Amino acid sequence: MPRVITIDPGKSKCGLVLAEISEKKIYEAIIVKSELIEDYVRNLITAEDISQIIIGNGTTSREIREKLHFFKKALITFEEKNTTYRAKARYFQLFPISGLQFFIPREVFILNKNLDAISALIILEDYCKTKFTFNQNIDFKTWLK
């Protein structure tokens, strides 16, 4: 089955999600340094059957599209308004607070989190108009160095 890549572009880092649309499953969620996004996507394309790449239309979207010019299939730009803000709420849906931590303000938990991969997930869910589940345990805070 062909898979899709969704990218939340940024100046220094990009959130990236690899998903299967027909199964509504996420197979990978990672944060990649912006200067490494081209190489990372090239490697994914050689390993996976990628049918399209969806890129958020925000910060550095044009630059990321230019880096991915080699992709000869569908390269789609999609609205990403408020995805970073919405990612904070989605984070707690994905990773619910339990025990005594429940009484601590949520903002304390979110301060040091990198939400770019969750923003990429929200872009994908908005594009497909459906929620996705995870194929395995995924660490949304992973950086590709």
Image (cartoon, helix red, strand yellow):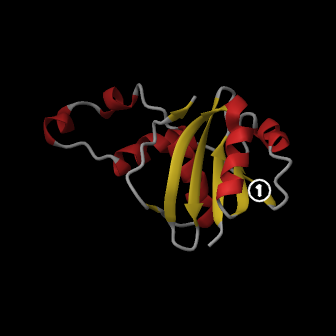
Q: Residue at x 52, y 47 (%)?
A: 29
Whether residue 37 sits left or right of residue 89 in the image: it is right
Question: Is residue 103 visible from the viewing direction of this image?
Answer: yes
Report which quarter residue 8 is drawn in. Answer: top right
Closer to us: 133 or 107:
133
Image x and y of residue 45, in percent: 71, 55
- The quadrant the N terminus occupies is bottom right
- Give the farthest residue toward the left: 100
Q: Where is residue 115 in the image (x, y as percent from the top left)?
A: 49, 37
Q: Indicate the quadrant where residue 10 lies.
A: top right
Q: In this view, does 55 lie to the left or right of 82?
A: right
Residue at the image position 51 percent from the left and 39 percent from the top: 85
| Quadrant location, the C terminus | top right
Q: Can residue 56 be seen in this view?
A: no
In this view, the residue in front, 115 or 107, is 115
Residue 28 image point, x, y percent: 52, 51
Along the viewing direction, whichever of 130 and 133 lies nearer the viewer = 133
Q: Is residue 142 left or right of residue 82?
A: left
Residue topped by disc 1: 76
Q: What residue type is labelled 1?
A: Ile
Question: Residue 84: percent from the left, percent from the top?
Answer: 54, 39
Using the image, determine if residue 9 lies above or below residue 73. Answer: above
Residue found farthest to the front: 47
Secondary structure of the residue carrying tag 1 is strand
In the image, is residue 34 above or below residue 38? above
Q: Residues within 10 Å of mark 1 (few under 14, many from 20)?
A: few
Q: Which residue is drawn at 60% across and 52% down?
A: 123
| Residue under the image location 60 percent in, 57 percent down | 124
